[in-house]
Amino acid sequence: MRSADIMAAALCDDLSGAAEAALALGADTVDLVRSAQDWDTQVLDLDIRQADPETARAAVRASLSDRGQVFLKIDSLLRGNVEAMVRGVRDVRTGLVVCTPALPVAGRSTVNGRVVLPVEPGPGEHRPASVEDALGELPVTPVKLDELRSPELPEVLAQIARTGRIAVCDAETDADLDLLAAATARVEDAVAVGSAGLAAAFGRARPARTAQASAAEAAQVLVVVGSAEPSARAQVELLAADGVPVLSVDPVTLDVPDLALTHGRTVLTVRPAPLDPAHSRALAAHLARLVADVVTSHDGPLRVALTGGETARRGLDALGVRRLHLLGQVHPGAVHARTDTGLEIVTRPGSHGGPDSLLAIAAQLHQPDLQEDL
């Protein structure tokens, strides 16, 4: 089976996740606005991770047809409007819904319905304790690892579908996700809810995708880090140690030094400080305006990396971008794309990548080698 043959659409709660899902599912584009055009796999960023629950539910409901298999992309740490999104599905569909946030490539598994991480998050990290908690009052049936790995999995899922409950599935490895994807694909009009890990499982059945060419000439690179994740700050420090200038926005006053791009690579980030969550969208919007000003005024080749789904979406909105054309990936989660105007960007979730992630992204954008992974 090809993923494009079974997935009528992928609906995503933020932009960086939409880019991950699109690449995994074999789609060529990510849309930032709804379109009536029919693609093999239409991937749409609903931009609802930080929306209120009713808005998130309505967005899913309005974007979901009553036929065809659909992938619903959620955060691997269960942040955002997971319950509201699945309620939007249930407003339209009564069939099988499977859910697992497992993301083995990042060391994130789902065991006994709980997200297991290689390193526990800090005390400031707020997220649901389990998938069941994230789904609120929705009725669920757990699918443990022994059931997932048994030949009876298709019948187990069929029985759960007949009850109208959500199948909450454990998964530790990519092989587990492959089993779940294969069983789900056999059920007409099923909805798969998960992270990029589950999207990749559906995508592994497709033929290899041909890389799209990136412009070969060197360019100035602006790396925008809007995420407060400790790992992202450590990645910025590694760039600074490599001689890359780091310009920091004050999260309260929004003051920033002059954004002159003269060093080949430049980082724009947010100065570490306690931040009211209610202020985070205003901060992302301010970063977006700064990015748009740089892109529109810069003379010469320029490429941009945007880390954090909110930062990426606000930045592209400020530039009037409505669609991304996928080129490849620098590493899992870091997706290289081109806008309709020819601007090359990389989007990446704030919590993804190893210590050298931003170094690799900046190097690829500064002087592409045209040999990215797909």
Image: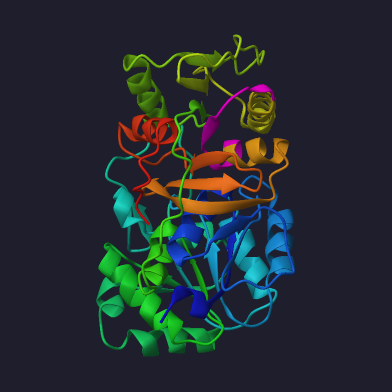
The quadrant of the picture occupied by the C terminus is bottom left
| Residue ranking furthest to the front | 217
Residue 169 shows up from this direction:
no
Q: Position of residue 21 (x, y in %)?
A: 49, 59
The image's colour scheme reads rainbow
Which quadrant of the view contains residue 257? top right
Residue most extreme to the top: 257
Vertical placement of residue 320 versus 229, above or below: below
On the image, the x and y values in percent for residue 353 come to: 35, 40
Q: Position of residue 285 (x, y in %)?
A: 69, 30
Q: Residue at x 64, y 79 (%)?
A: 93
Residue 7 location, x and y as percent?
A: 53, 75
Asked whether residue 171 appears in the rendered view, the answer is yes
Magenta residues, as a range? Answer: 297-311
Residue drawn 58% across the image and 25% down it = 300
In front of the other: 283 or 161: 283
206 falls in the magenta region: no
Q: Is residue 122 left or right of residue 257?
A: left
* Magenta span includes 303: yes
Q: Locate the N terminus by quadrant.
A: bottom left
How many numbered marks appear?
0
In the figure, 202 relative to 6: above or below? Answer: above
Asked where in the image residue 179 lies, by quadrant, the reply is bottom left
x 68%, y 25%: residue: 286
Figure check: 220 above or below 91:
above
Between 259 and 58, the one lying in front of the other is: 259
Q: Quadrant of residue 232?
A: top left
Q: Residue at x 67, y 52 (%)?
A: 32
Judge whether 229 appears above or below 52 on screen: above
